[in-house]
Image (cartoon, rainbow, N blue to C red):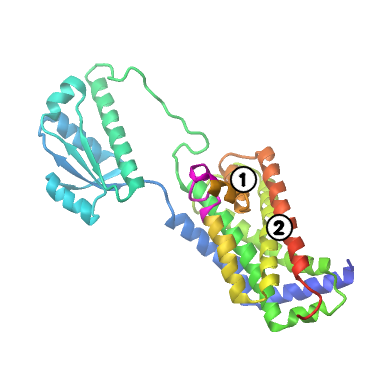
Amino acid sequence: MNGRRLFAMMRKEWLQVIRDPSSLLIAVVLPVLLIFLFGYGVSLDTAKTRIGMSLQDTGEAAQSLAGAFQASPYFEVAEIGPVDRLGNALVAGRIRGIIVIPQDFSQDAARAGGTIQVIADGGQPNTASFVAAYASGVQANWAEARSTERGREAAAPITVEQRFWFNPELASRFFLVPGAIAVVMTMIGSLLTGLVVAREWERGTMEAILSTPVTMAELIVTKVLPYFLLGLVSMTVCTLLAVFVFGVPFRGSPLALLVIASCFLIPALGQGLFISAATKNQFVASQITLLTAFLPAMMLSGFLFEIASMPAWVQWLTTIIPARYLIPSLQTVFIAGDDWGMFARNCLVLLGFGSIFFLLTARVTKRKVA
């Protein structure tokens, strides 16, 4: 590489970034919008689920259990009435479940603990499972507290005390927000280079550059380095928002985060560079970037859906998605701490992807006007 030529090309690229509002918009404004969208719009937590209650027993035990449901932080008893009327509310979507405390519940509770009926909307399987599980938990806690108050041992001979490491509250934002940072970095790295370089092909400035003595290595470095730094700036902004706005803990080291982000930006930028060099059109480059980078990072990286629960052939497909190797590393460095063994393996895979993309870019970029 020629230092003088490299410096001139780098200066030209920075001036282009500064003078192009769309580049700064994608690099600074878009990450903030996306992180707020994912942070507030995507949540797997179930809190204050609206339910109905059919209280068919007026005994003391039934009233006590009804009060336990009304005091639960997981439920909001929105309607109380007969099952038929509550069923209409369930169909209309005003409530997500029905708790039926049957007749003679108080008498049964005095002998064997009593049983309740839980009716949930199977049209939303996840919510239905949450309602059934939390309703069982409320009843179990109520039965244990009632036995303790009356000086009797709880019915269950074994007491299970659950302990969750790193995320005791099971707050979904603790792993969704770091995953959202990975999606943002995918979007920024691939889309930014894809659009900017394709724009140069459309305007004819890329042919002018290729007609100069600039080498292919110098061209790739000057096209990647400015957007690499912009990607790190976007990652820093998203990290600060995650910690100080969304309250996500950061238990790792800034060095680990920098290494992980740098290793991921290389294949992300390489993918955008390859797409732009192959298509030479902004619209086509943006569509291909969305289909091959953004959507796979959303659906096939483990961000929203567990990879282990996917069909076997889909699990194999996820091995070629770079974001799959970034998301577990980000989640670990945020909520668990540094695990350099895992980081090293994932970073090596990401660097391998980056090498492939840059080799393909050099291959499809011809030093002549087709």
Which corner quadrant holds the N terminus? bottom right
Q: Which of 233 and 190 is in front in this view?
A: 190
- Left or right: where does residue 130 sit relative to residue 236? left
What residue does disc 1 label? 329
Q: Which of 235 and 245 is in front in this view?
A: 235
Q: Quadrant of residue 220?
A: bottom right
Can you say whether 319 is above or below 103 in the image?
Answer: below
Q: Which circle marks residue 234 in the picture?
A: none
Q: What stretch is highlighted in magenta?
A: 299-312
On the question of residue 327 being in view, the answer is: no
Residue at 14% in and 29% down: 105
**Which of marks 1 and 2 precedes in the sequence?**
2
Which corner quadrant holds the C terminus? bottom right
What residue does disc 2 label? 266
Can you say whether 354 is above or below 337 in the image?
Answer: below
Q: What element carries label 2?
A: helix
